[in-house]
Amino acid sequence: MTALSYSQVMGANERVMVGYIGLGNRGDQVHEGFLEYGDARTAAICDLKTSYMDLAEKKAKAKGHDTPKRYADYRKLIEDKTLDAVVIATPDHWHALQMIEACNAGKDVYCEKPLSLTVVEGRKMVEAAERNKRVVQVGIQRRSAKFLQEAAEYARSGALGKITLAQGWHLTNEWPVGLGAAPEGPPPNEAEWDAWLGPAPKVPYNRNRMYYNFRWFYNYSGGQMTNFGVHYVDMLRWCLGKDSPKAVTVMGGKFAIDDNREIPDTLQAMWDYDGVMMVFTQINANSAPGNTQKTEMMIRGTKGTMYLNLNGWEVVPEAITELPLPQRNPVDRVTERAYNPSRKPVIEGRKLTGQVTNHPHARNFLDCMKTRAKCNCDILTGHLSTSATLIANAAFKTKSYLEWDAKAEKFTNNAAANQMLSYKYRAPYKLP
């Protein structure tokens, strides 16, 4: 139903009172997704930037909402007993603390991806949701796009034949300036800088570390491996019907861009998903397409190739032959010449268009709050997809091939890499 028709059939007592923590770039986009629906009310907002809260309030009131409460401390928002749900769109290093505290306070949670900064955090978030019987949606919006649901169903049906490779690309050209080499120095506001860092280590202020650019620094993010990689890993393993990889290895580095980022500008990760190779390619110094169809993702099967994008997917059939591969020899060119012409498609091509937006994902969360059903991207789904990218970062940092025990959530062949599955929070912060 449209947002208007939905709001007309909802009683006032069924309205969901939502509090928002983090209203920057992504938080603003998620907030707009919820504002489409009359049964979701922006009841409280929290951010370190007053200008972000001003904009959120303006948008909420334009939709007929009452003036939302403002909180400088996210803990006070979580303690607000008038709220039914909390939306978390803060930097990655804050997700675990805020999500677990919200669950413990009896709130349902919409948490942006990547779910966590470490694997241990992610597991504790899963446990908190289960222990408190909370509905949790992780912000991997492709899961709520109908055309991609159909793509995953098609891929899992076996129509593509035996799938051997699934790949995603994050391709941009940020050369030569990138973020720029911002100098360290005193923060404009020491209290704001300390609050923004939260559980992360205390380091000298650098403007590139705060707000949107935090994604290029490992204390607050897994880099583009988790920022974009989580989307691709999740979509591809959904299509494969796989949960966790058996092993991972990564190569890359900061090869071209001269700024103060910590993450690589060129990287390739490879996971063994029990007989299927999954690959994530990150190139930030060249934006040429990764495949002939110029799509974000590709799945290669023996009968055909699926290309996936934010606006559609397509299947291109392979030409197959039952003839054995000929042994080339000078006295029998007839058999050799007959081989390629004997190839014929065994499946039909398919093409479907669509669009990934924030609205259906928000709608699914609101509906599941009322039915207590599992969300399209529930907490465990988000954890598995995030964990795959986090262990890839461990492989990159240790320059190793890592074997992964998914049940124990430990590496079996590298003690140093296991130390990267968690980190010690800066006092007084503690992971519950």
Image (spheres, helix red, strand yellow):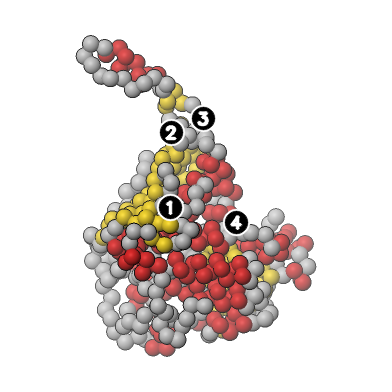
Question: Closer to the observer: label 2 or label 1?
Answer: 1
Nearer-N-terminus badge (1/4): 1
Which residue is painted at 46% across and 61% down in the image?
408
Residue 417 sits above or below residue 161 on the image: below
* Residue, disc 3: 348
Question: Closer to the observer: label 1 or label 3?
Answer: 1
Q: Is residue 302 left or right of residue 15?
A: left
* Residue, disc 4: 376
Other residues around mark 4 within 10 Å, as few (<14) / some (14–19) / many (≥20): many
Residue 102 sits above or below residue 264 on the image: below
Q: Marks 1 and 4, Cα distance to the nearest angstrom? A: 21 Å
Q: Quadrant of the N terminus?
A: bottom right
Q: Marks 4 and 2, Cα distance to the nearest angstrom? A: 29 Å
Q: Residue 143, how many percent across, how many down?
A: 56, 54
Other residues around mark 3 within 10 Å, as few (<14) / some (14–19) / many (≥20): few
Q: Amino acid at mark 1?
A: Pro
Q: Amino acid at mark 3?
A: Glu
Circle 1: element type: loop
